[in-house]
Image: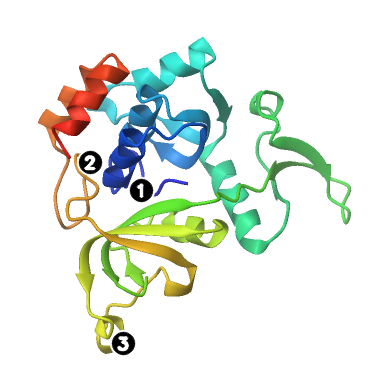
Amino acid sequence: GLGGNTLNRAPMAAVMELARQGKRGLRLVKTAGGMDVDLLCLAGCVASVDAGFVSYETEYSLCQHYRRAVQSGAIKANEHACYTVISALRAASCGIPFMPVRGLKTSDLIKANDYFAAVTDPFTGETLSAVRALSPDVCILHAQLADEQGNARIEGPLYEDVLMSRASKAVIVTAERIVGDDFFANSSLKANIPHFLVRSVVHAPRGAAPCACHGAYSVSDEAIRSFLRLDSAEMLADWLNRRA
């Protein structure tokens, strides 16, 4: 599971390290992916993607590495609506196997994704759609603040990060700043990711770059455009080494 949304607060430092380490067979879960998904596809790390949207924001066009990997059959795209990813995470966070949704009744998505099915409301007899729970083995979230115990605070838009932390079996937090253990107790700012969900905390200043992080920095146009010019895993490896 990857936190953030498109080019905003994606855990890019961790994503790049996954690529450097040559991880394979990853099944990615994200409501709206962008450079993070695209980079891991170019690196050959990905087996499947469950997402409602995978693209750069308008200025940078489509995620071409993701697109080519799907078209070639190198990865399996389990296409969702963004809301069905959210519903699948909600089901996992509640410990139930699926979540009914009212949508998809006139959509071909239900035929294209094995994680959808029709269900009957036992109280009214109405036919609804259902989405199977998605419970990532690990999710990686980038936060502005965290302490060494694992309490973390995301500032600005939360996207699905808090929900994903509840749906996942383990959480890794990368953080712009590490604060003292008494910070959240003594401050009006409180954690929205509690320590007991978190397996590891990584101090990663600019850990969302070259994507944006609310209140800290914006998108690096030069870095994203230089990535978009890459067309092989070998070129990516050199690009990553220059940013290590």
Q: How many residues crowd mark 2 within 10 Å: few (<14), some (14–19), many (20+)?
A: many
Q: CA distance from mark 3 to mark 1?
A: 26 Å
Q: Which residue is mark 1?
A: 4
Q: Amino acid at mark 2?
A: Cys
Q: CA distance from mark 2 to mark 1?
A: 10 Å
Q: How many marks?
A: 3
- Name above or below for residue 217 compared with residue 81: below
Residue 213 image position (x, y, % from top left): 22, 51
Q: Is residue 126 left or right of residue 201?
A: right
Q: Amino acid at mark 3?
A: Ala
Mark 2 touching mark 1, by CB under 8 A? yes
Residue 131 image position (x, y, % from top left): 68, 42
Residue 66 image position (x, y, % from top left): 41, 22
Tell which circle, 3 or 2, labels the residue nearer the N-terminal end.
3
- Name above or below for residue 72 compared with residue 101: above
Q: Amino acid at mark 1?
A: Gly
Q: Quadrant of residue 73?
A: top right
Mark 3 touching mark 1, by CB under 8 A? no
Of the pair 72 and 187, the residue shown nearer to us: 72
Q: CA distance from mark 3 to mark 2?
A: 31 Å
Residue 242 image position (x, y, % from top left): 13, 32
Q: Is residue 88 left or right of residue 57?
A: right
Q: Residue at x 42, y 73 (%)?
A: 195
Mark 3 touching mark 2, by CB under 8 A? no
Q: Is residue 76 left or right of residue 96?
A: left
Q: Quadrant of residue 5?
A: top left
Q: Which residue is mark 3?
A: 185
Q: Which residue is mark 2?
A: 211
Q: Residue furthest left?
A: 222
Tell which circle, 3 or 1, labels the residue nearer the N-terminal end.
1
